[in-house]
Image (cartoon, rainbow, N blue to C red):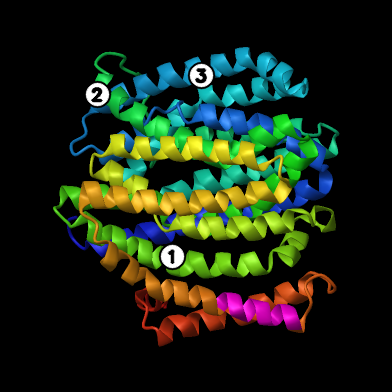
Amino acid sequence: MLGNPMSKVRRAVIFSSASQYVVRLIGLATTMIIARLLTPDEIGTFSVASAIVMIIAEFKLLGAADYLVREEELTEEKIRRALGLTVLISWSLGLFIMGVGPLVASYYELAPLAVIFLILATTFFLGPFISIPMALVARRFNFKILLAANILSSIAALVVTVTLINLGFSFYSLAWGHVAKILVEFLVVTLTKGFPTYWRPMFSNVGLIAKFGIYNSLTNLLTKGVTVAPDLVIGKMGTTAQVGMFSRGQGFVTFVSGTLMSGAAPVVLPFLSDAKRSGTNLIEAYTKATMLMCALVWPVLAVASVASLPAIRIFFGDQWDAAAPVASILAIWLILRSTHHFANNLLIASSNERAMLEKEAFLFVAIFALVIFAYPIGFLAVAYSFLILGILETVIVTWLLVRVLDLSVFSFYRALLPNLLISLICAAATFAISIWIPFEAEPAWKPIGVVALCLPPIWLLSLKVLRHPLYKEIGFTAKRKV
């Protein structure tokens, strides 16, 4: 990087975090309201539809955005070719979703799925004109101007969704809320001066981008497939109410981990790509990014695992208590998964897309096999199958990074040891609180309030005592704000 690289990255992380955290806060409000307005059956019905569309959606950009971020030298022709490829794929998929909706509805014996598919398909026609400008902005680390698009679109989704639910549109409201989000993003990107806009796509010589995009999109599809596997399998083998219950437990812990990682995540690929262009050691950059991120994510997930019952009650209400054991188990899975959360960014930045795809393909097949095997045993067995997947993923990704990038296993995991100790301390403190204030017997706000008051100081003290680098980063940020 030129100039002061870490200052540029820190600014990007600050603005990205501000944007992502506000969006997550709005999303949390939306989730809490919806959980109280819709039944598990209604939420389960939409979950089945959105899970399938989410998987298909991974192909709509065909990696064009990440290609623009990674490419060493950009020209207007490359940008227009990326737009052209995105238009071809995204529009074709939009038409495909419209056509396949009735077939999916017939397969799951849920007639409303056809209409939900039709509504969600409309977003595919605006996607190219949003993703390309946003990728160019991310490449320049100019995350400040992404704030308006992310925040305004999230507010629009909340208002439209809640309004339509109150008007009696049930699960269709969730689909229309997503449409409103995409439409507002499009308007902000189009009308805001800081976003470069491209309207004339080029459809010639898109092979290089497509080659990169196939690896990238297939990887994203398989990654999403791991997350939505329970919705698809339980939706067919069980009931929509079970889908809704599992999705609430999974949704809680993925919301927690996603909120913590969302601030840094959009900056990681531009950072690692820039590091490669400037000759910086990628493994050192990757290890440091992972160590700092896990010092925040692991302790919070450990606390969420212990305090899942009152947290679920606060988030969704008492009617979702059965989701708490699912959340406790999946929180541990996410601790394992976050160990190599930035691995795909690293493999893209180092031009190892094929290895990335092979890894995700194995995990995709593994989780579907595990869930299909586990469901007849019992509802919680599905959650435990994710623990097996987490162990497999940690081992496989570690081996892969050793093979293709000479990762030092000893150095990498030694850097993460303080994070493990901090997580155990936070989990033990939460368990002690559960003895003092029984989670099942007391109103949810009491234990959650005590956890919220006690755990941050315990976490900060642990960082300081162990001389963790994150403590210095927090101090740096605090000084900058002053």
Please give the label number shown on residue 294: 1
Question: How many other residues sit within 10 Å of disc 3, few (<14), some (14-19) or many (≥20)?
Answer: many
The residue that disc 3 covers is: 93
Q: Residue at 54% across / 56% down in the picture? A: 333
Q: Quadrant of residue 153?
A: top right
- Can the viewer see residue 370? yes
The residue that disc 2 covers is: 208
Foreground residue among 59 and 118: 59
Most extreme residue toward the bottom is: 465
For numbered disc 2, what is the local secondary structure? Answer: helix
Label 1 vs label 2: CA separation? 35 Å
Q: Earlier in the sequence, mark 3 or mark 1?
A: 3
Q: Which residues are magenta?
A: 426-435
Q: Residue at 36% across / 24% down in the picture? A: 83
Foreground residue among 327 and 290: 327
In what quadrant of the picture does the N terminus appear?
Answer: bottom left
